Amino acid sequence: MKIDVELSLITNLIINSFVLYLTACFFKEKAKLIFLTSLIGSIMALIIPALSLASYAKILVQVFLSILMVSISFPYKKFKTFISKYIFFLGMTFLFGGGCYALSLSVGSLPIVIVLLVCFVIFMCAKYIIHQKNKQKVIDNFSFKVKIFSGDKVIEEEGFLDSGNLLYDPITKKPVILISYDVFSKLYDNVNYLNAFMKKIDLKNFKNGHYIKLNTVASGTQILVFSVNNVLLEGQGVNKKYEDIMLGLSFSGFEKAFGKKILLHGSLI
């Protein structure tokens, strides 16, 4: 009996820690006193069923306990903020409980080790989803509609404002916007990928075309840079137009990381 109680305490402690950690990740905050809060919740989870209380009273005690746990780990200034965290905390609690319950219905009573394994899998999946969601939110907040005007061509794409892109052209002293080959090929469809990658390009076909050495975000030792007539940025309350802006052809694969084919210079906004 003692062993069962200890295992139940450890299981609840781990699950509560998972729930608090995921809540912190979702709101991009650092949870306080996770171990203490999880321990309080675990001890109460063992005590509540043994209390001689009506069903509704036990539910009220559990609600109060969950409110206490969220309040300890996530101090708040606005009630709306607390409600958001509390709802997410409950959602994660039901996620773990529901996952184990659904599995137990399928295969029967589960050993503690299997319960912990299931909870760990749920934790890792939820953590990955939250990470991707937070990453996408950051990308969306720093994404802009980009129109590139070059001669008689107008290219429309989405760009990501990267504060880490501080690349300047040492000749014109202008900031350089990095573009992928997909965008480049829309401007210069007569230059194939291999020639562009191998730098077998006639620079006379490009306005202010030349190569510059890199010490920042793009891969390789040099990239082709050239100027275009205008670049228009729109979005996030911004509407700016830049003349004779420099573009740089990058093969670094930044579009895979940001999901955008244009990497805007950090000084443009």
Image (tube, grey):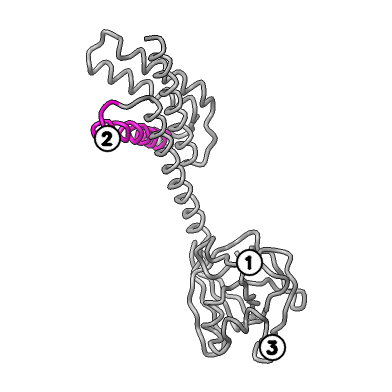
The answer to which of 210 and 61 lies nearer the viewer is: 210
Q: CA distance from mark 3 to mark 1?
A: 23 Å
The answer to which of 267 and 104 lies nearer the viewer is: 104
The answer to which of 56 and 11 lies nearer the viewer is: 11
Judging by the rendered image, the residue that carries numbered circle 2 is: 102
What secondary structure is found at the residue carrying circle 3? helix
- Amino acid type for the residue under numbered disc 1: His
Image vertical order of residue 127 relative to residue 51, above or below: below
**Quarter of the rendering occupied by the C terminus:** bottom right
Q: Quick check: 208 left or right of 242? A: right
Judging by the rendered image, the residue that carries numbered circle 3 is: 203
Q: What span is in magenta?
A: 82-109
Please report the residue visible at 26 percent of the width from the left and 15 percent of the height from the top.
57
Judging by the rendered image, the residue that carries numbered circle 1 is: 265
For the stretch drawn in magenta, what is the main secondary structure?
A: helix
Please report the residue visible at 30 percent of the width from the left and 10 percent of the height from the top.
50
* Magenta-colored stretch includes residue 108: yes
- Amino acid type for the residue under numbered disc 3: Leu
Q: Earlier in the sequence, mark 3 or mark 2?
A: 2
Q: Position of residue 180 (x, y in %)?
A: 56, 73
Q: CA distance from mark 1 to mark 2?
A: 50 Å
Q: For label 3, count other residues whose C-alpha is less than 10 Å away and answer few (under 14), some (14-19) or many (20+).
A: some
**Quarter of the rendering occupied by the N terminus:** top left
Q: Position of residue 105 (x, y in %)?
A: 23, 32
